Image (spheres, rainbow, N blue to C red):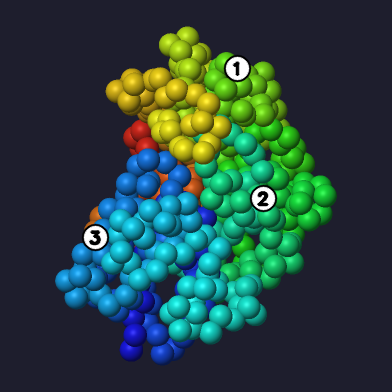
Amino acid sequence: MPKINIITLGCSKNLVDSENLATQINDKNIEFTFDEFNFDADTVVINTCGFIADAKEESVNTILEFAQAKVDGKISNLYVMGCLSERYKDELTNDIPEVNQYFGVNDIKEIAEQLKIDYKKELLGERVISTPSHFAYLKISEGCDRTCAFCAIPLIRGKHKSVRKEILLKQAKNLAAKGVKELILIAQDLTYYGLDIYKKQMLPELVENLSEIKGIEIIRLHYAYPANFPYDILRVMKEKNNVAKYLDIPFQHISDNVLKRMRRRHNRKQTIDLTEKIRNEIPEIAIRTTLLVGFPGETEKDFEELKSFVKEMRFDRLGVFTYSEEEDTYGGDNYEDDVPEELKQARADEIMEIQQQISYEINQAKVGKIFKVIIDKENENYFIGRTEFDSPEVDNEVLISKNKNLKTGEIYPVKIISAEEFDLYGELV
């Protein structure tokens, strides 16, 4: 039986693309797997990331590793798809010719044909999932219309294109029928959803419709752009018990000087007003944000302002990237990358040190409280799950002693008995 291994690098949006390819491959006469370390397959497809320097390096190294495996006869065919391949196809073809063929981000039909698989358009509402069977990502749009100075995504993925609501509802119903309980909505920009095809922001209506699907117990929102935020989504969060009180909003910075240079469409006051309004409407909400340090022109004063912002806002979750210059972006073309790499990393470390203490204090406040916890997996000592305030891979985990038998994918009431900076320990109630 032919065996195809699909390796996904980068974000959850890439993961959905890999799953859509797997849906086309899903045939009783073909075995496929999602395994980064599997060299036993006849054919390997690498779905690459090209967002920042570190991600590019990881993608190139992975391609080289499997190119050598092909030379050594461990695999027969090697194909590369995704963001890196979309942007640097010619360079990759010249530098790593061992790859059979390179494809872009929207070439699933062409990849299927290369794999000698009949592309079936009628499967567009179907999904093979590579995550644990109880949660899945739902990509509601592709591309981005924003023009942030540091970001190459619009160059790679193109303009914003919403997926029609009826297709998303069909896909969500199919996922629920397969046992998916948690839907994680993703896009480059959730808040823009619907503007291109419905001429209005449709995220609140979409989430309301998804919340009515039988079997969907948690709906989580990732990547909401701060400008023109659709406030009606807060009403939906309050009214629908299965919409998690969780929001991922990448603010990137707080200094008006840096935000203007970044070509963001929000300023300091709008950022703080938005955060306060969300928390006033839903006091228990967990807000996750992402920051970018070391952007060209970021002064020590700008960075001190950012540190103060982190201390004052006390975000539940926070991640930090260091700026990497991207060719053909506004920042890459117009600004000198004038912040030394060592200083960028030092600033990122300083922010995370502040956030570590904040996270510890927030987690300590949860001790003694009871939360609904969905079980993701288990190891030798613990069942490992998450509360509604935690997303998989990036947020806190709840570790529960194995003195009772719990089932993966089930939701249980759990009392938090102790806490660390990024982990909670609990016991079944």
Nearest the eye: 263 or 354:
263
The residue labelled by disc 1 is 256
* Count of marks placed on residues: 3
Front position among marks 1 and 3: 3
Q: CA distance from mark 2 to mark 1?
A: 26 Å
Left-right relation of 196 to 425: right
Q: Which mark is residue 65?
A: 3
**Is label 1 in a helix, a strand or a loop?**
helix
First of labels 2, 1 by sequence position: 2
**Is label 3 in a helix, a strand or a loop?**
helix
Q: Position of residue 226 (x, y in %)?
A: 65, 33
Tell me which amino acid carries mark 2: His
Q: Which mark is residue 270?
A: none
Q: Position of residue 340 (x, y in %)?
A: 34, 21
The residue labelled by disc 2 is 160
Tell me which amino acid carries mark 3: Glu
Left-right relation of 31 to 183: left
Tell me which amino acid carries mark 1: Asp
Nearest the eye: 23 or 57:
57
First of labels 3, 2 by sequence position: 3
Nearest the eye: 139 or 420:
139
Nearest the eye: 196 or 278:
196
